[in-house]
Image (cartoon, helix red, strand yellow):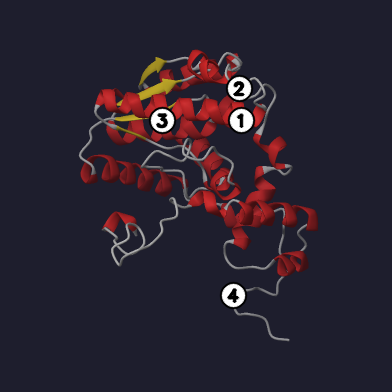
Amino acid sequence: MSRLPFISANPVDIESDENLRVNEPLLAEWLISFLQDEITRRRGFKTAVVGISGGVDSSLVAFLLAKALGPENVYGIRMPYKTSSQDSLDHADMIVKATGINMQTLEITGAADGYLALCPEADGRRRGNVMARVRMTILFDQSQKLGTIPIGTGNKTERLFGYYTWHADDSPPVNPLGDLYKSQVWALSRYIGVPDVIVNKPASADLIVGQTDEGDFGISYPRADRILFYLLRGFTVARLLEMGFPEGDLILVKRRLDSTHWKRHLPTTAMLSSTSINDYYLRPVDY
């Protein structure tokens, strides 16, 4: 039986990250140019606002923005909740000192608890979603105050897993990390100078005490990234099984990918004309 030409018959090292390697200097240069183009040239802004959590993703975006716009034109916003870890706050401070960006702290406890007091039955997921949406409300309001736009920090692995609060983390109109797997975010962060203590700590949304991304996933980022790399290139689960990937990992990743597809789209419009926005009526930035 012949194989498709783009599928190698050679053995694949399923523990290798070779497919995920990037040219860090070139990638950093390209993302800095991307931010300058999207923020300044296309939209006419000279400044940007970004939420700084103390995690690797927002730290990397802060470094990129500081290089793209100048640190004096970047406004980092810390938005802790009463259960946020002290490490997150300290690491956010570390990023401010390393990049020279502006920083403001706006605690979300009062705003989030004001609503949650009306919903004592809310479980951890609902509470986390409320916190994430309060944070994005603050970020957009601060951008209005400063006359600029907020910048997103979600990476490709989170987006493919649907691991974000809909209309919260995914809301900012510009996102430099959206096409970078988490493994690539780590690599670029090390290159650009994000402190090791931030790059190496377990990834967490810091919404629930003790929560980690990989604990929620049931699989590590590197293992998930290796599988996602092939799935997005059209490899079937059956073929990946032949290549040696564990069946349990494949089922988990494929299920997360398929079940969260709806989150990666704008709201579905009932199309009534040939000028339906984002369906037929497209401007260059829509492509």
Residue receiving disc 2: 119
Q: What's the residue at 47%, 31% (across, down)? A: 58
Which quadrant would the N terminus be assigned to in this image?
bottom right
Residue toward you, 153 or 25: 153
Is residue 286 toward the left or the right of residue 135 in the image?
left
Q: How far apart, in angstroms, are the residues tagged by discs 1 and 2?
A: 10 Å
**Element at badge 4?**
loop
Mark in the foreground, 1 or 3: 1
Q: How far apart, in angstroms, are the residues tagged by discs 1 and 3?
A: 28 Å
Does the residue at mark 1 contact the one at mark 2 (Cβ under 8 Å)? yes
Residue toward you, 159 or 24: 159
Q: How far apart, in angstroms, are the residues tagged by discs 1 and 4?
A: 44 Å
Label drawn at residue 62? 3
Residue receiving disc 1: 126
**Residue 35: x, y in percent?**
32, 42
Which amino acid is tagged 2?
A: Cys
Residue 17 seen from this side:
no
Q: Is residue 131 above or below residue 24?
A: above
Q: Counting residues from the N terminus, which is met first, the one under dot 2 or under dot 4?
A: 4
Q: Is residue 287 above or below residue 222?
A: below
**Residue 14: x, y in percent?**
72, 57
**Element at badge 1?**
helix
Q: What's the residue at 77%, 68% (across, down)? A: 242
Residue receiving disc 4: 6
**Residue 149: x, y in percent?**
31, 34
Which amino acid is tagged 3?
A: Ala
Which amino acid is tagged 1?
A: Arg
Q: What's the residue at 62%, 62% (across, down)? A: 231
Mark in the foreground, 1 or 2: 2
**Element at badge 3?**
helix
